[in-house]
Amino acid sequence: MKRIFTLLMMFMGMGAVANAQTVTPLLTGETSPEAITYYDFVEWSIDGSIPTWYVDFGDGGPFTQFVDNPDATGINETAKSLFMATTTGVDWWGNFLNFRLETPITITEENRYLHFFHWREILNNGWSVSINVNEPLEDADKGTLRFDGNNTGTEQWEDIVIDLKYLMDEGIAFEKFMVIVDKDWEGERDNPATEYYFDEIILSSDPLQRGVDILEGTDILNAQDQAQMDALVFSTQNDANTWEVVDNPFTDSWLNADGKVVKYFKSDQASWWQGFNVSFPGIHVLEYGEKQFMHVMVRTDTTCYIQLHAVDNLGKEYTEMFIYPMDEIDGDWFDLVWDLTSVASTVKAFTVRFDVRLDAEENYINNTPARDFYVDEITIDGIEDPREGTDPSIGVEEDRLGSMRFYAYNRTIFFDMQGAEMAEVYDVLGKRVASRQLDRSAGLNSISVPQEGIYILRVKADHKISTAKVLVK
């Protein structure tokens, strides 16, 4: 099974991409006056440890200075850039670089996105940006007023984009932002001395990074295409995990029997979130106003949960949990289908997390048994159905253990199973649509589904799973 998908071109239909962009310069180093008038460490830290950590361009400051651009040949061709450098490893506390506006700015859709070019000699532990404060915000503010990340490479300009939607929605003016240049939360604070540059700080209506490559096509990972594989960046997120491209070993499959596939080994040393991770050399832009679905073909030798994890161009993360129903499909390939229409507008990286498990308190379990998993033909397109005739009933018998009675009425599934402790419902695409903890002493239990259709009911009792196909009307 190669090229079994329908090719569609990814049009740059996002409103912010298609329309003319609005740009408000804040700090360039080449104009006067500048909107940002303070760009140095918070004052109290200058009186403390900062003078021993950073190059001092005066006598007790400043600790930043405009110098020649270290690389004016790429996306940032300006002559001057804001420079700072460490002289030793630094503690994150007090390492608070402030950028303050002379006059606060009201945030609207026309200036919603804060952009700044950033260049790092060594990546170290990355950066953290907090909005409208002089010191860093707590974890509870991540994604709204605090944003953590890192550049993807050394000695190159990259455009960091921060979404100021929270300020816009709450009617809060934008006054300043703070950057922890090296967020070494833990460890020995022994990162090597490093040079850092900032430039072209602006507000814009454009959510996409300046200089980003828009990738065309919907075939985002095809092990058969060596040129495509060479352009991708792969990570197993744990050195004990491995991946390789192999000849498809499942030649008797009715769905995917030939060509090359990815074999991923998850070790018993892996944390639950460590999976098969892929980063693109640009971003995939989803077609604006159209239904868009990510398809991931998977196979393994056990029934397990699989979580798909995607990252957009702003670094926001999205996840969806699925199940690989080994028994119901006789261990064949299974096409996971994730509706991205109302989730993300771009994709720059994704991870397939295999064998995700939860304990009784709903905590994720690390160090699950080592196992091989297989991945193939990851696409994004407008096709909702699983590829190549996946049977909507996926071969589930009415009751595989013969110990559960059930019926459906008015979008609710009623069932009776002795000792039942957990119930889950999956649609025919393998996506979990409902789950609930049960009272083991109860007789008749129930669980609701979002709409009419065919569902797979899975009920756990005394370490056994009873599975049933249910038609809900």
Image (cartoon, helix red, strand yellow):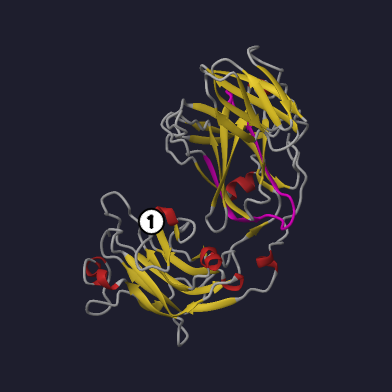
Residue 337, image quadrant: top right
Please identify the quadrant where the N terminus is shown: top right
Q: What stretch is highlighted in magenta?
A: 276-303
Q: Note whether residue 55 is visible.
A: yes
The percent coordinates of residue 283 (x first, y second) are 61, 56
* Amino acid type, label 1: Glu
Q: Write down the residue under mark 1.
A: 138
Please provide percent x and percent y for residue 173.
49, 73
Residue 80 image offset from top left, x and y in percent? 44, 79
The majority secondary structure of the magenta stretch comes to strand
Asked whether 168 or 28 is in front, the reply is: 168
Q: Is residue 290 magenta?
A: yes
Q: Residue at x 69, y 34 (%)?
A: 429
Q: How many labels does the image show?
A: 1
Residue 51's place in the image compared with 446, above or below, is: below
Query: Which residue is painted at 57% across and 23% down in the image?
Result: 302
